[in-house]
Image (spheres, rainbow, N blue to C red):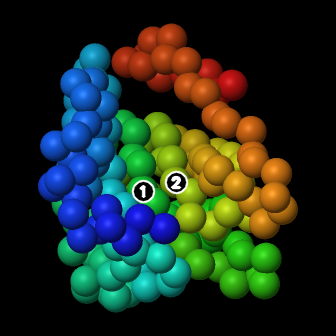
Amino acid sequence: MDFDLERNSHFYKSLLERGVYYLENESVEIEGIKIWGSPAVPNFVGVFNYARGSEIRGIWDMIPLHTQILITHGPPAGILDKTSRGFEAGCTDLKEIVENIQPMYHVFGHIHEAYGTLKSGLTTYVNVSFVSRRPKPNAPFEFEIIDFHSSKIETI
């Protein structure tokens, strides 16, 4: 877990090379694609924890309406968020915001055992957790942008 990153994110951002982005509740536009990212999660396990309700909602309210790719650490409620103990750990406030914005992709992790994809409405949800509860790493996801402005993207 990135406890030091949470305490010293400005230092780590200064180390990034040109063309590498660390998004902490902010946007970047790359070749016309609007991306917003956040490490925030409702109180659970790890870092960048915020209380459920108004505190975490304040983070999600920063997401611009025109976001095309949303990257968050944790999942929205009920979507690729079930732990091995059967607990749905996703954020209800995030789910409401994502359903309103309807980005083409919502990419997240955090709940390792819920790795995979799910299409709902206009949004493809992708849990890209690096490892699941077994010691074997999950396969990576690769996005090939064919023509983003006409919604033609392949997930490989």
Sequence order check, earlier mark of 1 and 2: 1
Residue 40 visible:
no
Snapshot quadrant of residue 41: bottom left
In the drawing, does residue 133 fall left or right of residue 32? right
Helix, strand or loop at label 2? It is strand
Q: Is residue 92 left or right of residue 113?
A: left
Measured Cα–Cα span from mark 1 to mark 2: 5 Å
The amino acid pointed to by label 1 is: Thr
Instruction: Give how far across and how far down residue 53 sits, in percent.
Output: 33, 87
The three-letter amino acid code for the residue at tag 2 is Phe
Of residue 139 and residue 124, the one placed in the foreground of this image is: 139
Residue occupied by mark 1: 72
Task: Tell me the SS state at disc 1.
Answer: strand
The quadrant holding residue 56 is: bottom left
> Against 116, is 132 above or below?
below
Query: Percent position (x, y) of residue 19?
Result: 27, 24
Residue under the point 61% across and 22% down:
154
Check contact, mark 1 vs mark 2: CB within 8 A: yes
Crowding around mark 2 (Cα neighbors within 10 Å: few <14, some 14 to 19, many 20+) is many
- Relative height, residue 65 to residue 1 (above, below): above
Mark 2, residue position: 108
Mark yes or no: residue 8 visible.
Answer: yes
Residue at point 37%, 71% (across, down): 3
Q: Position of residue 64 (x, y in %)?
A: 22, 49
Residue reaching furthest to the top = 146
- What residue sits 81% from the left and 58% below the top? 135
